[in-house]
Amino acid sequence: MEQVKESAPVETPLSPAKDDQVDAPVKNTVKAAAEGEATDAAAAAVGGTITGAVACLVVNDMPESLAFYVDVLGFKMFMGVDGDRQMTATDDAAVWPSIVFAYLTGTGVSETASDLMLATRNTEDAIGRAVGDGPLGKGVALYLKGPDPDVVAATLPPHVEVLAQPHTQWYGTREVTIADPNGYTVTVGKHTGEPCPVAGKGEGATDGKAK
């Protein structure tokens, strides 16, 4: 009697999933859980999870620096501290020369993603000693989101140095880059939602005009 060979099963959309197909999401879940545990362990090792990161810029001239960040860029002064560690008025530029530390915000409310601190150079504290008496600004670049780069560029006082005129980057963000009074690089960027320009022009950017 001739033996009948069994045909291979035909898979259909209703066929049971293979083991490796079932295991894939499970493995991903296990991997994510493991990574989460590793992150929790790292946070526990330092006593807690980081909830914010605020830049503190050492400055040479506090009134000049406040004029730049408040008057030119639109930051709001949330808190000022004078040399006697006393709180100062935040809405009176006349007291700026007495301020050695300033806490600025983009929204007027602290503990947000737009916070920025300024501290007068002082070789008697740890940060001041680390900075020394050399030039400031090297290796530090701030990236500010929100304001219109073209408006910022059009309203800049003559003394503010423009490092890069308004242009659209290859990743679709309109940007202008300027220097603050201490030599720090400050870029103001705003996503335009426009298609990314062709890279390879200058710094991979275009001003949107035909060449």
Image: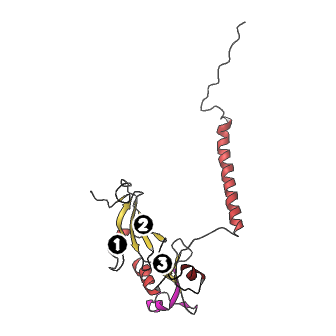
- Residue 65 covered by magenta stretch: no
Residue closest to the eye, 86 or 159: 159
Q: Position of residue 72 (x, y in %)?
A: 39, 79
Q: Earlier in the sequence, mark 1 or mark 3?
A: 3
The answer to the question of whether label 1 and label 3 lie on touching residues, with beta carbons closer than 8 A, is: no
Residue hosting label 3: 136
The front one of 147 and 46 is: 46
Q: Position of residue 1 (x, y in %)?
A: 73, 6
Q: Is residue 80 above or below residue 41?
A: below
Report crowding for label 2: few under 14, some 14 to 19, many 20 or more residues within 10 A (C-alpha).
Answer: many
Residue drawn at point x = 60 percent, y = 82 percent: 126
- Residue range corresponding to the magenta coloring: 84-108
Numbered label attached to residue 189: 2
Q: Is residue 123 above or below residue 155?
A: below
Work out how far the residue at label 1 is from the one at label 3, CA to CA, in angstroms. 23 Å
Distance from Cα at disc 3 to Cα at disc 2:
23 Å
